[in-house]
Image (cartoon, helix red, strand yellow):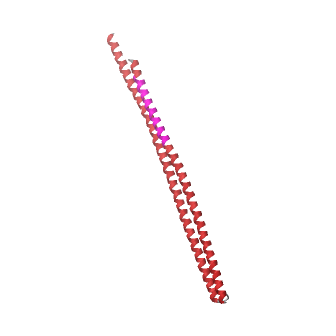
């Protein structure tokens, strides 16, 4: 009978230890999966951010180059208009007149306005693209933060589940020991009573 009690306790203890190991293994797998998801999210966020930054930077450079081309074209057109004005004024003998001077000033004024408008348009476009880039960086930072928070949450949950599994295994073993001890005491008491009656 004693051997059966010891075997029963051993089986319950082995079962509790096995359940604990299974729970520990499951939580480790859960934690590894969460880590892989976090690493994937971090890598994806980094690639997305770098790719978007490259595209936006390229767009900013193209905008600046196009603006410079527009300004260059406008400057050439202004030079042609100045040359035409000088030629017409020269044919009429009006090179030193106030009318010629006013026309020259008006031409320069409108040319400067055109140049300023192009500069403002280029600056606005570059600034808008810069804001887009900052938004991409902020969005990817949020992705990284969320992935890290998810991993942290899973990590805490897994640690708590491991602790619960250990506690449950301990309680099962302790319960089996107490139950076995009670049965043993009951058995011994029964034997003692039986041996007292026999005498």
Q: Position of residue 128 (x, y in %)?
A: 53, 65
Looking at the picture, tell me which residue is in the foreground, 141 or 59.
Answer: 59
Q: Which residues are magenta?
A: 8-33
Is 157 located above or below residue 73 in the figure? above
Q: Is residue 183 left or right of residue 24?
A: left
Which quadrant holds residue 107?
Answer: bottom right
Q: Position of residue 59 (x, y in %)?
A: 56, 62
Q: Position of residue 116 (x, y in %)?
A: 59, 74
Instruction: Reply yes or no: does residue 126 show up in magenta.
Output: no
Is 96 located above or below residue 179 in the figure? below
Instruction: Reply yes or no: does residue 15 show up in magenta.
Output: yes
Looking at the picture, tell me which residue is in the foreground, 158 or 139.
Answer: 139
Q: Main secondary structure of the magenta part?
A: helix
Quadrant location, the C terminus: top left
Which residue in the rendered view is the most extreme toward the top? 199
Q: Position of residue 109 (x, y in %)?
A: 60, 80
Quadrant location, the N terminus: top left
Which residue in the rendered view is the most extreme toward the left? 197
Is 122 located above or below residue 40 in the figure? below
Is 124 located above or below residue 155 in the figure? below
Query: Number of numbered discs present?
Result: 0
Looking at the picture, tell me which residue is in the foreground, 197 or 185.
Answer: 185
Which residue in the rendered view is the most extreme toward the front? 91
Q: Is residue 71 left or right of residue 144?
A: right
């Amino acid at each position: 009978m004693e051997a059966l009690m010891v075997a029963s306790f051993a089986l319950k203890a082995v079962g509790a230890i096995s359940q604990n190991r299974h729970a520990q293994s499951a939580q480790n797998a859960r934690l590894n999966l969460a880590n892989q998801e976090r690493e994937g999210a971090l890598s994806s966020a980094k690639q997305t951010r770098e790719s978007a930054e490259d595209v936006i930077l390229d767009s900013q450079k193209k905008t600046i180059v196009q603006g410079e081309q527009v300004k260059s074209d406008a400057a050439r057109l202004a030079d042609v208009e100045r040359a035409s004005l000088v030629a017409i004024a020269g044919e009429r003998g009006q090179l030193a007149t106030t009318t010629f001077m006013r026309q020259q000033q008006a031409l320069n004024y409108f040319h400067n306005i055109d140049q300023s408008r192009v500069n403002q348009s280029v600056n606005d476009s570059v600034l808008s693209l810069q804001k887009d880039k900052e938004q991409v960086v902020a969005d990817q930072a949020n992705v990284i933060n969320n992935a890290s928070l998810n991993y942290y949450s899973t990590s805490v949950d897994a640690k708590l589940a491991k602790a619960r599994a250990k506690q449950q295994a301990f309680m099962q073993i302790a319960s089996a020991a107490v139950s076995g001890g009670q049965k043993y005491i009951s058995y011994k008491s029964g034997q003692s009573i039986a041996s007292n009656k026999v005498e």
